[in-house]
Each structure stands twice: as structure tokens, then as C-alpha cells.
Image (cartoon, helix red, strand yellow):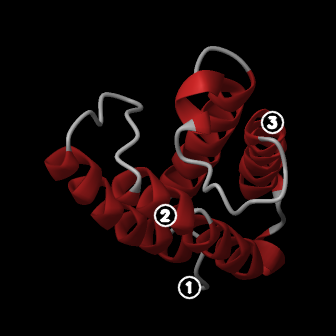
Amino acid sequence: METKDISRIALGAFLISAGISHLTFARKEFQAQVPDWVPLKKDDTVVYSGIAEIALGTATILTPEKYRKTMGQIIAGFFVAVLPGNIAQYKNRKDGFGLNNDKLRFARLFMQAPLVAWALISTKDD
């Protein structure tokens, strides 16, 4: 198994784990990241995004090789799409996941770029 495949499978496992946490023990924490302008209830948004993460993670692991690049682009788009939640958490000074001060919430904003890179690199064509 190639390093890229291990990285892709790890990304899938990461997404599945995050999705499960959305639906179970971290539901309240994730609600802190839902911007007020989202037209759904915060808990519903967390549940739907958790289901999406589980589906994306599963697809990342199981997608046939010829579709992996597209899958990586979809996941990268998902990571970009959740960035407004991280910005809202910072802007509104909402605690969650140990991000209990502006410095930590601000630093969290820079974690999306490595996630996007992980999605694109681990699924790119050889």
C-alpha cells in the first residue's frame, strides 16, 4: 500500500470519526461553530454535517481509483464550506473544543488549509 493510499484512508477515518462525534458526544461543542445566519436549527445543522462527514469519509475510503481525484475535490470543498463556522466561532467568541480564548479560536482558522491540502494530495492522480 502506498503512502498516498494510507493518507487517503486516514482522511476517510478522520471524517468518519468527526461525523460520529457530531452525532454523539460533541454535538454541543459543534453547535458553537454554527453561524447565526444559517437558516436551520443549530442542532439540525450539526446532525446534517455529521451525516455528510460520515458519507464523505466512507466514500473517500471506498471510491474507485478513477474517481478519487473528484472525491478529493468534493472533500476540499466541504472543508472550505465549513470555514464560515470557524470564522463565526472566532468572531462571536464562542467557546468549543477547548477554544476558549481569541488566540486559540484565531489559530483554528488556519487549520482548514492543511485539511484542504490533505484532501487534494491524498486523492490526486499519480
Q: Which mark is residue 103?
A: none
Give, as a three-letter code, the residue at label 1.
Asp
Question: Of discs 3 and 1, which sits in the foreground?
Answer: 3
Residue that numbered label 2 is attached to: 4
Vertical relation: 125 (above or below) 34: below
Residue 40 vs residue 77, the one in the foreground: 40
What element does badge 1 sit on?
loop
Give the Cα separation between the discs numbered 2 and 3: 30 Å
98 horizontally vs 126: left or right:
left
- Is there CB contact under 8 Å for labels 1 and 2? yes
Residue that numbered label 3 is attached to: 47
Vertical relation: 50 (above or below) 65: above
8 horizontally vs 94: left or right:
right
The crowd level at tag 1 (other Cα within 10 Å; few <14, some 14-19, many 20+) is: few
- What residue is shown at x 24% (from left), y 58% (from top)? 106
What element does badge 2 sit on?
helix
Where is residue 74 drawn, in percent x and y? 73, 74
Query: Considering the image in quadrants, where does the C terminus appear?
Result: bottom right
- What residue is shown at x 65% (from left), y 25% (from top)? 27
62 horizontally vs 68: left or right:
right
Can you see residue 4?
A: yes
Give the Cα separation between the discs numbered 1 and 2: 10 Å
Give, as a three-letter code, the residue at label 2.
Lys
Where is residue 41 drawn, in percent x and y? 82, 42
**Residue positioned most to the left:** 103
Q: Quadrant of residue 3?
A: bottom left
- Is there CB contact under 8 Å for labels 3 and 1? no
Residue that numbered label 1 is attached to: 126
Q: Quadrant of residue 107?
A: bottom left
Vertical relation: 26 (above or below) 19: above
Where is residue 31 drawn, in percent x and y? 61, 36
Give, as a three-letter code, the residue at label 3.
Val
